[in-house]
Every structure is written in structure tokens, then in C-alpha cells.
Amino acid sequence: MNKTSADILIKKREDLIKRFLYGNEPDFLEKNASIIDEYFVAMFEKSLAARDMTIKGSPFAVIALGGYGRKEQCIHSDIDLLILFKNSVPPEVETLIQELLYPLWDARFEVGYAVRSVKECLSMAFERFDILTTILDARFICGASLIYTTFMEQFRTDLSEKHLNSTLNYLFEHGEKRHFDFGDSTYRIAPDVKSGFGGLRDYHTLLWYGKIKSNIKSRRGLEYYGFLSHFEYLTLEESLNHIWKTRNFLHYLIKRKCDTLHFEYQTEIASLLGYKSKDNQLAVEHFLGDLHAKMDFLKQVNQITFEDILSNLCIKKEHSKPLPTKTDGLLIIKRRLCFSNTIAIMQEPQLLLKIFLESGIRKIPLSIEARRMVSEFIHLVDDVIINDFRSIKIFKKILSLSYWEFNVLNVMLTTGMLEKFIPEFSAIVNKIQFNHYHLFPVDKHSIRSVQIINSFRKNNDTPVDTLYSFVFKEVRDKNVLIFAALLHDIGKSDTGKEHSKKGARIAHPILKRFGFNWTQIKDVLFLINNHLLLIKTATRRDISDEETAVFMANKIGKIKLLRMLYLLTVADSRATGPKAWNKWTENLLRDLFLKTMGILRKGELASRKTHNLIKKKKNTVLKLTREKWNPDEISRQLESMSRRYLLYIPAHDIVNHISLFNNLGGKDFTWQVSKGKNSNIRSVAICGKDRPGIYSKIAGVFFINELDIVGSQAYAFGPEHVLDIFKVKPPKDKLFEREKWEKAEKDLIHALGDDHFLNKAVNKIPKRIKTSYGKKSKPNSIKIDNETSSFFTIIEVFTYDFPGLLFSITNALYQSHANIHVAMISTKVDQVVDVFYIKNLENDTKIETEQGLEQIKNAILKSLPKIRAKEIKNEKN
């Protein structure tokens, strides 16, 4: 049987894709487009409709548009087509469409087409930007070539004579809108390799600009017509090839068009591209580091384009005249900072640094040509200039002038000046941490932290931001804080453990080079060493326990260090991403800071304010319960409650808890399930007799009823009772939620009456679990803290999430004769961290013997599933 043109196309593409996957097809994009061209030529030659229309005086041209027109055709890119007639469009065109396109649609190709006359096309091109850019990329395939050439000549004439400025405006405005809509791809866990800032559209914009301004015919014309230097053109080619390869593999894996590099595909694409793990860094981290570097260059390409567009648009004459600055050798031309000439740089190389200071002070960016000159002449910045006290003073001033809105420090990084002054910074440039937690590469994260610190200089409207501004004003040596922010993650040059300690060792000689005295160096090193201390304590310790703040005060020791550590922690967390910073963490951190500050200032925690707050709350409870219960009995109950409970539980909740207690009677427990402000969370208050293992049994009952615990607190409620408050996700089927809670209540009654009731639940806990694709799995680990609290042993469990996790751990603690008083649930990058405050079940004291602690540690580890990473399927056939 004879093969159709569509069959031939499919077979040729399959062979081409196979060669590409094996790395044997460097010109894949162009050849992919050429194969499609061959299909259209073959179909045109066989088309009866095409022959009829031509004979009847309606010849037409078949024209490739968009990426297909540029011959940049990825595996699953759209095929965009224009069928262009000189005059009116004849009705027979419908038959032509059936002949040309139906076979492609049947074969699952994404084909877009338009049928227009020359007049219609010219009219629409200057009304709609998306049509205009596709025409800029138009390429003749087959048919009447004269119609194509006549149309393109008229389009060029109309563009240059009537629509040049409006088209440039379109190009600029749509570029800015695109960046706003899709965001900066170099600051995304899942970057958009096409439309985001740093994506392929930034290169397309430059190409369109070159076609508009100089009628260039191909990418090579960008160098020939002076839009890019030779070095920039070579870097562009290298960057595009890398991003196109990434995009093609993404299409191949997903089996459809996709431009967002989702987290779950990144490891597999790294493997397909041939990356290997080395130097304690995962293959995927090497891949993403390279990708960020290439996308960073495309961002610079975009800035070149936009600056050139702005210079060609209508700028007032007074702005186009060179304006002097206070620094000889620097000028302002068209709202950009420029060097007066290269001779000035040769005579005073320090100008290469001074231009950044001038930029920061005036809030005027460097021109693209100035950036090029900094990169090209940076070799003139030798050790003499770097170690000059004037250069050091300028560098420190530049750090204090870097804001998110005006990013002078980032420009220093892209030109190489930052690394020139701090060579150690090179090791973290485009360094990726492969997890959902860290949003930015390490270098961008460090710079972002500096910018957030500088933002505290401004007064803001919200109370919390006002607190940051107030604390920042109280910091005497702001250079210490800013350098700590810049260098706090410098130890991540190696992915080994304890990057804080390593970072302090790396930072020490840097600080000496910058002329800091011993006291300043000691403070910066303390901040780097301890930059995770506050956030870890706030999220993994019971900050309502007074001893937590006392421990922190003893650890930090000085008010000046606490202020700086607090601001550094806020900046570090904000710059990490939304998983590290939210209202909950912000409030916890603020509370811990204020409590620790109170101790350092006054030497005591039980302030008069706290005492008055508890007294006021007791009076409110008495008023609310006056008509219901005996006031003397309520007073006795309030006196038996812990300060921690009275301080942090709202008065109305206390009344509800008293009601639970008074309704207990002879029952083992009573509970109340309530819906909070967040409809996806239920608060379950359980009041019951204090008996061994009650917490574990509650966790087990929730597990067998598929109710996920997200947080909990435990309080003594008189001498013989406890109150456990759980935050729980509701059942999946909310229509039967009431029945689910009724069943859970019955199960808890059985569990408390029969120690063997939950044996089957233990067997349901998985024996093995898999971690994320390609991520080197970390072993389960246990940390024991017997220092922070005088009354409790604190157990930290680091593992991966799985159904029944909390029950598994708490059951192991119960079997080890440990009683749980507080449980906290949080995350550490891609792991779960469960924290438990426990005491010995038999004598109600801390567990301090080595044998007892080892027994608990082993029991928990034995209860947890074994960990292994998911396998990567690397299929190239």
C-alpha cells in the first residue's frame, strides 16, 4: 500500500526525534520544520483544489508563521500557517483546507491556520500585536511566491512609514505585560522557558526588534547589524541551544506542548541531557544551575532590546543631551548612566566601581553599553584597587543602596564586579537547591536577603513592618547586618551538612579584607553561624513554654545580636519562598523575639503585662460562666490551669473546655469538633482522664478514620485530667462528615478500653516509602534535646510524610513508657519534622539516662518505614 504524505511526515519525524534523543541531531529544530515543509509542498502539488483556484485566477501562497516560520520547531510546537490570496478569498479554499490540514489533525498535530487576502492581512497586522509578530516571522513555503514577496514589501513599507513608533510601543508594552503575567523565570521553582522573564520570548523580542528596525533575515543578523557583540551572539547561541534542548525533552516526556518546567520532570530531564551527580551536588542541581545561567543571559538580551527601543522612541531633547554627574568620567545619556569614554576607564579603573555607586544614589540604571564596558575592562580592577580603603567604602555603600525595586547589586553580579571583590561568591552563583522550599538560586537568595534588609529602612503601614523598621533603626552597625545577609549562605558552595559553620569559616577572611575590626567580625560570624537558630526554635519548640525564651536569651546573650539576628531571620525566610514564610511563621518569630528581648532587657519573663492579661482573662471567664456554674468552683478550676494555657487560649474557648470537663462525669472523655475560620481545618478539643498512651490512641483512631492531624497541643486540666487540642483535616467526603466523627468517637471509646484495639492499625503503617524523583533520600533521624527545657525531654523526628506517621511515632513513645505533653508538626525542606515534649510515664520526670534515651530513639526508628528514592525511567527508544 502506498504511503500518504502524512505517513511519510510521521515516519521522518519519528526518525528525527530518535536521533535527537540519542544526541545525534544538532540541527533538530530546523530539520523538523523542513520535514513539515516537505509535507506541505507534496500536498500542494497533489491538491486538486489548489490547481482549480490557480486556473480560475485565484493563486495563493502557503506561508509559515511564528516558531514554524523561524524554523524553530520543537517536538510538539504548534504548526502555524497562513494561506494568502492576492484579492478575495474563493469558496474553494475549504476543500484546500481539508486536503492540507485534515491529515495533520487526524495525526494529532496542533495546527493553526488563517485564510486572508493581502489587504485583510495588512489591516489586521497593525491592529493586533500577535498578528504583527507572526508576520515578522513569516516564511514562504509553496504556491505563488510573488504574492508573498509583494505582501512582505508592502508590509515593510507600511511598517516603516506609518506604524514604526506604535509598533515599537507595542513591543515594549507587551514585553512588560508578559513579564508581569508570567514572572521572572530565574526566580521560579517551575520556570516558564518560553514566556517568563529569561525565557525564549525575550530572544524573540530582540529578533522582532531587529526585523522591525533593520529588516534582518535571520538570527545571525543580530551580530551583523550591531544589536549584539560577537561574544554576546555566541553566548546567545549557546543559551538558546540549551533552552531548546530542555524544551524538546519536556515535550517528549509530557507528550504534548508544555513550556513550564514542572518540578517533577526536572530530574528526568537532567538525566536525559546527560548530567551526572558530582561534588556532592545532584545532577538535577547542575542542570538547573546551567539553565538559570542561560536564562539570566536572555534577561540581559531583553534589557538590551528594551533599552534600544526606548532610545528610538520619542525622548525629549533635554533627556537626549549628555548630563554631567558629580563623578568625572560618568555621564547621564537618555536616562542611563554611561562612561564618557574608554580612556577615562583606563586612566581611573575605579570608575568601574563608582558607576554602581552613582547608579544606586541616583536610581538610574547603567546603560547596556556601560555594562558591556564593565565586563570587558574588569581585568583592570586589580588587588590594589580592591584593597583600597576608598573602594571598600564605595562597596559597602553600594550594598546599602540595593533594593528589590532598584537592583544595583544584581547588575554587579551579572557584570562580574561582585565576584571580583568577593571571589568566594562564585561558588554559589546559580547554585540550585533542588526542593520545593528554596525558590531562588543561592546567589539570588543572598542578594534578595540584602534587599529585604535595606527595605526595613522605610516606614511601612502594617504594624509588623513598622516593628522591622523600628528594630532596624536600633541597629547601630548596619554594615555588620548587611554583610551577614550577603554571606549567610556562602557555606552552601558545598552541599555538605552544617553550611552555617562552613559559611562562617569562609566569611572570616572576606571580612578581614573589607577592613572590619575584630568585634565586627565576631558579630557577623555569630549571625552566620546562628542564622537558622530563631526560625528553628520558633517553629520546632513550644514558644508558649517560658523556658524556650530563657534558653534563647542565654544562647544569644546580647540585645544588639538579638536585633540583628531577628532581622536576618526575617530577610532569610522571606527570600527563601512561601513555604518558609507565612503569617504563622511571622507571628511565631515575632513572639519569640519579643519574649527573648524582654528577658535580655529585664531579666525576667513574668512581666506585669502578662500577669494582668491572665487576670483579665480569668475575670472574663467568670463573667461568661456566672449563670451556668458555681463561681467558686470555676475559680478553683482556673487556679489549677497552667499559665501557658491561660495565656494562649481565648476566653470563649476556655469556657467551652470547662463545659467539656463538667460534662465528663464517669466517661473516659468528651470532645468537641468545631470548624474554624479556615473551613479546611477542624479543631478537636478532647478532655479526658490522664491515662497512659491517650495521645497515641487518639492519633491511631484518627489514622484508621483517615483524619489527618496537622497540629496539636496538650495541657494539664487539673490534677487528674488532660486537655488535648488537635487541628485536623476534615474527611474527604464532607457529606458524611457527621457520621465519620461519630464512628471516630466510638473507636476512641474502644481504644481507651482495649489496648489491643489498634493492633490492626499498626499493621496498616507502610513498611517502605518512596521519596521524590531522583532526590537522594535522607535517612530517618532522631535528635534529642535535654537542654532547652528543665521539665521535658524534647524529641525531634526527621522523616518523610506517610499515612499514620503521627500514630507510628506516638505509639513507639507509648511503648517506651514516655508520656507526650506537647506535639508540634512542621516541615524541613522536603522532610517532615515532628517535635515532642515528653516525660517518663512512671515518675513524671525528664528522661536523662543514656539507656532510656537510646531505647526511645531505637523504638521510633524501628517504627518508621524504610526510605528509598523513586527510580528514574530514562527511555530514549
Image (spheres, helix red, strand yellow):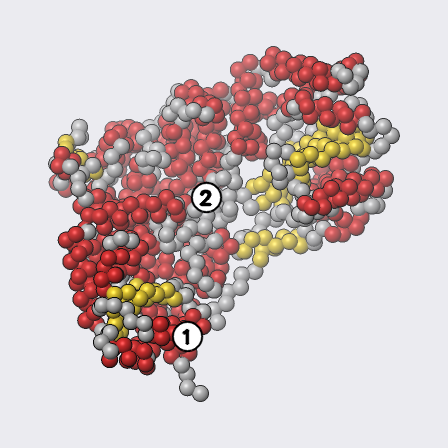
Q: Which residue is mark 1?
A: 103
Mark 1 element type: helix
Which numbered disc covers residue 439?
2
Q: As drawn, which residue projects farthest toward the right? A: 666
Marks 1/2: CA distance? 44 Å
Q: Amino acid at mark 2?
A: Leu
Q: Nearer the viewer, mark 1 or mark 2?
A: 1
| 786 horizontally vs 701: left or right | left
| 257 horizontally vs 174: left or right | right
Which residue is at 30% across, 29% downward? 397
How far across and down, in percent of the image, does residue 723 sit? 74, 29
Which residue is at 20% across, 64% downward? 151
Which mark sits nearer the N-terminus, 1 or 2? Answer: 1
Which residue is at 19% across, 55% downward? 159
Q: Is residue 431 visible?
A: yes
Do the residues under discs 1 and 2 have CB atoms within 8 angstroms? no
Q: Amino acid at mark 1?
A: Pro
Q: Is residue 67 above or below residue 635?
A: below
